[in-house]
Image (spheres, grey):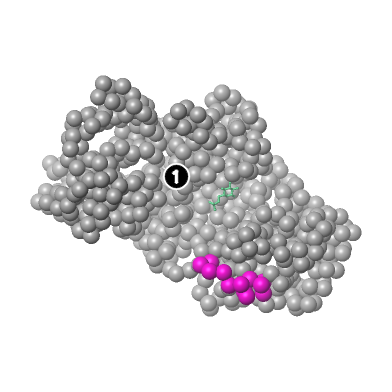
């Protein structure tokens, strides 16, 4: 944030569940970032509350531990110890149970802190506890008289907000029994991400996209939240949640509403939240019978070593997970928005754990230009224009279009215009919670969810939950392997409509190939642009031993077998594996054949494109010569690589 931003308002922040991991990993680093950026009021204190009988000094020590406290979890380039100490010295702790007597004592303590730091009576309550405690916390705070006195009271509620429609409605009721909607700030940490907030800025501050933002010009929209991590020891929680509750109903629906809502009348919190609510209320609610037609669920199985031993466990073998669990770790959904703007534009959502890559992207695909004008040229097909919002780990926006390849004939090549946050702005990495705290302390609810929004989101999810509950997957799970793209049915869902998932290849993915490891960003980006997709049916030969090598392949989805000269299988390749890279460096014949074992979707990098990239930037060629020697023991010249 630029330094001209005003300070947060004075307050005492009371964190319930303060001894949990969230406080030290995210909340304290976020407060520290605000302090470092000069945004945190000096009239500020933290009161941690929990059942542990610890003192202020012990609480401070646990927050500032060298290996498991702020010095470890801060997100800045370097740690400013003086600033860290100043912040932690404002921390206090009071043990308490959720009981009126205990909360009356808490109230006294908050009063003392308020007087000491002159917080003007303002209190921010942060519920970092399981949702079943939210109602009792609200009741007990009320019963202990926390609403009396001067200043404001605001409550930040962590997710998950309910576990289904009925429980969310009930929770809303419990919370709103004694408190007003304006006092409740429901967190969705995706709304704290700069790239998510930028969706609004991008749409409504740029005149050129809004006229195109509708079913006349947009063919489909894809939301992709792929995680390469598994449940990471959170099996106990995850097994009762699943990806629909954990990622889709909250984070993804928030992004969906930002991307597709109508322009708000202003940037006032309720002007934006009204439009978000309207959008979610326009999403078609499926009947249970429609669910299998539009929704695919999946669960990851183990990954295996070459000798057949289990390398990493499948979901059902994870700690604290039911060995016969029917919980989905992956889902792909086709949604339809029944309003004037979007009617007829399919919206595809996909999210899962233990997938091949980590990446959150939104891909807006425009309608393809008529190809007739290119009849009689070498152009076989036109690609649609795409606008890709890279949410994480890359952060930026990319517009994909086609340009003529220099030369005497009409040939097209996909090219891009790219904006990268990292290059355009120099800001410290934020956890996402900074802006949440800051907004809440200033009474701005824009980035928080409202009761009706939460309800609308659960209404969309509920039929899926009902259908899945009524039809347990049983032996259908696991249906995708770790490190793959997810179950094949997710591709079929989109292919039925004559479309495909647009797979965003990231530099990280390309760097898994020794040939590109550590490559310059410009080189990686040129290679990504040059990748073309192609598919082979099960049993088809992809490359044949003895044929000239003219390209390299990256398996996007499917499996292939490498065969020896006697056509005997040597080994199996799967999602994310690559083959034929030497073919880019040499024009020698292939020394093995590769056959598709299942339907195989591949990215191809043609040698001619690789040579062109080398010619366009001779310093890449020089680097490649060194690399070819070091990694493949090949002696090449720049001229070889440029194919001069
Ligand atoms: C959390 C989910 O809300 O979001 C996690 O509970 C998930 O399961 C996480 O991994 C993803 O957040 P991010 O910011 O890493 O995309």
Choose between 630 and 193: the one closer to the eye. Answer: 630
279 sits left or right of 484 in the view: right
Q: Is residue 77 above or below residue 486?
A: below
Choose between 95 and 252: the one closer to the eye. Answer: 95
Q: Position of residue 63 (x, y in %)?
A: 68, 63
Q: Does the magenta segment cover residue 446? A: no
Residue at image point 60% right, 54% down: 188
Residue at image point 38% right, 43% down: 502
**Which quadrant would residue 45 be assigned to in this image?**
bottom right
Q: Secondary structure at mark 1?
A: loop
Q: Is residue 548 above or below residue 113?
A: above
Disc 1: residue Cβ within 8 A of ligand 1's nearest atom? no
Q: Is residue 271 above or below residue 230?
A: below
Q: Which residue is mark 1?
A: 357
Residue 270 visible in the current orientation: no
Q: Position of residue 334 (x, y in %)?
A: 48, 38
Choose between 132 and 83: the one closer to the eye. Answer: 83
**Which quadrant would residue 184 be assigned to in this image?**
bottom right
Residue at image point 60% right, 65% down: 71
Provide the residue span drawn in magenta. 76-87
116 sits left or right of 341 in the view: right
Q: Does the magenta segment cover residue 84? A: yes
Q: Position of residue 84 (x, y in %)?
A: 63, 71
């Amino acid at each position: 944030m630029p330094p001209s931003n005003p300070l947060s308002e004075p307050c005492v922040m009371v964190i319930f569940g303060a001894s949990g991991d969230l406080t030290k990993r995210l909340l304290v680093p976020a407060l520290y970032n605000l302090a470092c950026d000069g945004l945190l009021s000096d009239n500020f204190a933290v009161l941690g509350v929990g059942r542990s009988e610890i003192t202020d000094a012990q609480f401070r020590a646990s927050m500032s531990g060298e290996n498991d406290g702020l010095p470890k979890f801060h997100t800045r380039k370097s740690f400013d110890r003086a600033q860290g100490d100043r912040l932690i010295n404002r921390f206090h702790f009071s043990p308490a149970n959720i009981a009126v007597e205990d909360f009356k004592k808490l109230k006294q303590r908050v009063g003392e802190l308020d007087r000491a730091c002159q917080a003007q009576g303002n209190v921010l309550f942060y519920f970092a506890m399981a949702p079943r405690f939210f109602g009792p916390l609200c009741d007990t705070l009320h019963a202990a008289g926390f609403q009396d006195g001067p200043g404001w009271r605001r409550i930040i509620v962590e997710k998950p907000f309910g576990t289904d429609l009925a429980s969310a409605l009930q929770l809303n009721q419990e919370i709103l029994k004694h408190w007003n909607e304006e006092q409740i700030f429901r967190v969705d940490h995706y709304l704290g991400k700069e790239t998510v907030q930028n969706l609004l800025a991008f749409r409504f501050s740029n005149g050129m996209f809004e006229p195109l933002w509708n079913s006349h010009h947009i063919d489909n929209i894809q939301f992709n939240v792929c995680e390469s991590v598994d449940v990471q020891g959170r099996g106990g929680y995850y097994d009762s949640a699943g990806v629909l509750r954990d990622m889709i109903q909250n984070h993804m629906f928030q992004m969906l509403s930002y991307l597709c809502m109508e322009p708000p009348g202003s940037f006032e919190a309720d002007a934006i939240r009204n439009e978000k609510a309207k959008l979610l209320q326009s999403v078609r609610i499926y009947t249970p019978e429609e669910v299998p037609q539009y929704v695919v669920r999946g669960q990851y199985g183990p990954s295996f070593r070459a000798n057949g031993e289990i390398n990493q466990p499948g979901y059902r073998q994870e700690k604290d997970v039911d060995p016969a669990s029917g919980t989905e770790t992956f889902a792909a959904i086709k949604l339809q928005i029944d309003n004037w703007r979007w009617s007829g534009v399919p919206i595809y959502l996909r999210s899962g754990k233990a997938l091949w890559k980590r990446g959150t992207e939104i891909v807006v695909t425009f309608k393809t230009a008529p190809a007739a004008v290119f009849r009689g040229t070498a152009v076989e097909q036109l690609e649609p224009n795409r606008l890709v919002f890279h949410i994480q780990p890359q952060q930026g926006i990319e517009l994909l279009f086609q340009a003529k390849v220099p030369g005497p004939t009409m040939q097209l090549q996909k090219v891009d215009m790219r904006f990268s946050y990292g290059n355009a702005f120099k800001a410290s990495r934020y956890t996402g919670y900074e802006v949440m705290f800051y907004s809440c302390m200033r009474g701005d609810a824009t980035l928080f969810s409202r009761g009706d929004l939460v309800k609308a989101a659960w209404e969309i999810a509920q039929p899926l939950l009902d259908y899945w509950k009524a039809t347990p997957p049983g032996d259908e799970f696991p249906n995708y392997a770790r490190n793959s793209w997810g179950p094949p049915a997710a591709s079929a869902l989109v292919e039925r409509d004559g479309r495909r998932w647009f797979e965003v290849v990231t530099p990280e993915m390309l760097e898994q190939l020794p040939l590109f490891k550590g490559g310059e960003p410009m080189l990686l980006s040129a290679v990504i642009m040059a990748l073309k997709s192609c598919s082979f049916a099960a049993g088809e030969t992809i490359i044949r031993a003895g044929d000239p090598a003219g390209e390299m392949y990256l398996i996007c989805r499917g499996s292939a077998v490498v065969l020896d000269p006697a056509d005997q299988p040597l080994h199996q390749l799967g999602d994310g594996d690559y083959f034929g890279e030497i073919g880019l460096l040499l024009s020698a014949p292939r020394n093995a054949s590769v056959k598709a074992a299942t339907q195989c979707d591949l990215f191809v990098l043609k040698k001619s494109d690789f040579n062109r990239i080398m010619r366009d930037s001779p310093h890449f060629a020089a680097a490649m010569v060194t690399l070819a020697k070091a990694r493949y023991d090949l002696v090449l010249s720049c001229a070889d690589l440029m194919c001069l």
